[in-house]
Every structure is written in C-alpha cells, then in structure tokens.
Image (tube, helix red, strand yellow):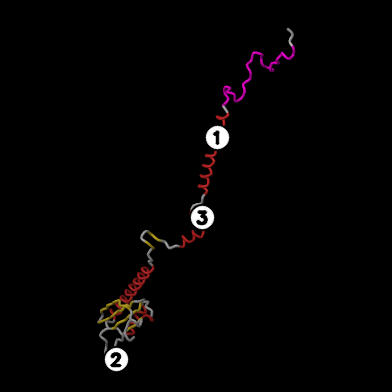
Amino acid sequence: MRHTPDHRQSPTAGASPDSPPASIPGAGAPGVAPPSAARRLWAAVAATALAAGLSACVSGTLSAAPSPAASAGPAATEARSAAPETNAAGPLADTSGTASAAAAAAATERTKKTVTEALGRLAAGSPKPATAQVSEALTGAGIAPAALEVSQSRTPTGLEADAIEAAVLQGGDCVIGQVRDGAVTVTVLPVLASGKCFVGS
C-alpha cells in the first residue's frame, strides 16, 4: 500500500513517537496549582504585607509624636520656671522677716553689753557720776552721740540727783542704763511714739 504525505505525522523534535502528549497547563497536571488556588495564595501574601506595612506606619507615627512638654515650646518652659516654688505643704515660707528680727535682737544685745561694761567702769571710779562723765564714757565705748540721751545729774534746784540714767536708741529698742550709788542696772524698753527714749527729751 502506498502512503501519501497526508498519512504521515511528523513527530515533535526531541520526542519519540511513543511519548505521551505534552501536558496542558491548568488541565490537572501534577505540580501545577489550579488557577483558583494561586489566586488565594497571592491574596494571603498581599494581605500579610499590607498588615506589616500599616503596623510600621502606626508605630513610626507614635514614636515621632512630640511629648506635651516638647510641643509646649519655650514659652511654656519660661512660664513654669517663673512660677513660685512650692513644696508638698504649699508655697515656701518667707524667712526674710524672721532673719531681720533676729538681726535686730542681736544688735540690741550687743548695745546692752556695751552700755553695761562702760557704765560699770565709770561707776567703779565715780559712784555718782555727772552727766558729762556718763556721756564721755558711752561715746568713748563706741555709742553714737546722736543715739545717746543722758539725764541730768542735778535737779533744777541744784541738788544732786539720786541716780543718773543714760539711754541708747537701737532700732526699735531703748537700752537704758542707770547708775545709783555705784550700782549699774541696764534694761531694754520699747522706743516711745516720739522716737525718743526719755519723755520730754
């Protein structure tokens, strides 16, 4: 029987005539996922990547957000620094008045000691000193003449006074020393409304 070209089949290059026909993609060949499974796989991968990206954006935004103190700016910092200091019990106490009172008391005590020592030395040599003697003794000890008042050693009738007194103005106090028959007494009294230590002086 004669074969015509129409009856011949040309085998595919590199394939033997006995080889099975090539597998068609998507036709259930082994190792190839169906199109619907591939789409589900790609959707899962995309969702995972999107979630990771959103998480990174949110964490970056939160970490970059300025703190309230930083966003307040220099004006708020200056306002806080200008506010008065307080402790748990409230505003800090002002001790300037206490310090001033302590300093005044110390000055009065020094003046009292000076008057006592000066009059004591004078009375040891002159039990009934004259006005001029008392003034010289106290100014010589460092008492300012403008702050010193001394009583008269004799009465208007010319009689000798029983005692002589001297007063030194020290702030709001009057340091008053008395010499009577050689004995010295020093006291501290408030200054009078006139600003003096002796009435009528």
Up-down relation of residue 186 to residue 161 (above or below):
above
Query: Of callouts 2 and 3, which one flags the residue occurring earlier in the amino acid sequence?
Result: 3
Residue 91, x across and y down, in percent: 39, 63
Residue range highlighted in magenta: 4-33
| Residue at horizontal 51 percent and vertical 60 percent from the top | 75
Disc 2: which residue: 156
Residue 93, x across and y down, in percent: 37, 64
Q: How far separated are the C-alphas under marks 2 and 3?
A: 85 Å
Q: Please state which of the two labelled residues, at mark 2 or mark 3, is closer to the viewer.
A: 3
Rendered image quadrant of residue 164:
bottom left
Q: Please state which of the two labelled residues, at mark 3 or mark 1, is closer to the viewer.
A: 1
Query: Of callouts 2 and 1, which one flags the residue occurring earlier in the amino acid sequence?
Result: 1
> Which quadrant is home to the C terminus?
bottom left
Foreground residue, 47 or 94?
A: 47
Indicate yes or no whether the magenta region holds residue 26: yes
Up-down relation of residue 39 to residue 172 (above or below):
above
Disc 1: which residue: 43
Q: Amino acid at mark 2?
A: Pro
As helix, strand or loop, the secondary structure at mark 1 comes to helix
Q: Amino acid at mark 1?
A: Ala
| Residue at horizontal 53 percent and vertical 45 percent from the top | 60
Indicate yes or no whether the magenta region holds residue 185: no
Question: Mark 1, residues whose alpha carbon is within 10 Å: few (<14), some, or many (≥20)?
Answer: few
Q: Amino acid at mark 3?
A: Ser
Q: How far separated are the C-alphas under marks 2 and 1?
A: 126 Å
Answer whether labels 3 and 1 touch (C-beta < 8 Å): no
Question: Mark 2, residues whose alpha carbon is within 10 Å: few (<14), some, or many (≥20)?
Answer: few
| Residue at horizontal 57 percent and vertical 27 percent from the top | 34
Rendered image quadrant of residue 178:
bottom left
As helix, strand or loop, the secondary structure at mark 2 comes to loop
Foreground residue, 22 or 158?
A: 22
| Magenta stretch, main secondary structure class | loop
